[in-house]
């Protein structure tokens, strides 16, 4: 709510603060530009998605699409793909530490990449 107030006061997009529903809408429907108009659309579309779909369905869709870094020159999208690329396992074979790494990597996947920055990845996971 603070981010919305800040953006309205500035009359432009200044600050984030998106729900998972909003992030999913941005990834799938809207363009990535940071404008107040895009943010308003994002909020209303996310409210509509929340009314139609369960939180579990929204979370699953988000986790299937989230960007989690690169494997060579290819982008890694979704936790299943990340699990196979980073750990050589399917998602249901991951242990809690592996799952914690994936959760930690969402915020900054290129900074918390275990191959490029193993110390950062371990610290964030912990």
Image (cartoon, rainbow, N blue to C red):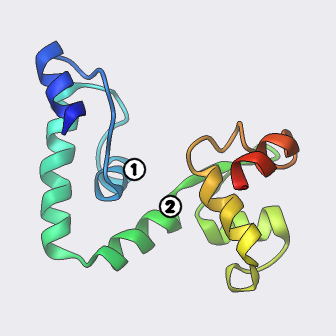
* Quarter of the picture holding the C terminus: bottom right
The answer to whether 122 is drawn above or below residue 6 in the figure is below
Image spot of residue 119 (x, y percent) = 85, 42
Please tell me how crowded label 2 is: few (under 14), some (14-19), or many (20+) other residues with Cα within 10 Å. some
Q: Which mark is residue 65?
A: 2
Q: Quadrant of residue 9?
A: top left
Q: Quadrant of residue 49?
A: bottom left
Label 1: which secondary element: helix
Which residue is painted at 36% across and 54% down in the image? 28
Q: 40 or 17: nearer the eye?
A: 17
Q: Which mark is residue 59?
A: none
Which residue is painted at 72% across and 43% down in the image? 112
Which residue is painted at 82% across and 49% down in the image? 114
The residue indicated by pointer 1 is 27
**Which of disc 1 and disc 2 is earlier in sequence?**
1
Image spot of residue 56 (x, y percent) = 36, 78
* Quarter of the picture holding the N terminus: top left
Image spot of residue 96 (x, y percent) = 71, 75
């Amino acid at each position: 709510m603070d981010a919305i107030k800040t953006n309205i006061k500035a009359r432009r997009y200044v600050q984030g603060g998106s729900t998972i529903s909003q992030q999913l809408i941005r990834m799938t429907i809207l363009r990535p530009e940071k404008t107040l108009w895009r943010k308003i659309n994002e909020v209303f579309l996310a409210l509509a998605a929340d009314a139609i779909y369960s939180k579990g369905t929204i979370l699953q869709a988000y986790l299937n699409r989230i960007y989690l870094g690169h494997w060579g020159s290819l982008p890694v999208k979704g936790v299943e793909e990340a699990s196979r690329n980073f750990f050589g396992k399917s998602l249901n074979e991951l242990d809690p530490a592996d799952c914690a790494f994936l959760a930690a990597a969402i915020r900054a996947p290129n900074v918390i990449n275990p191959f490029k920055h193993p110390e950062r990845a371990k610290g964030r996971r912990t």
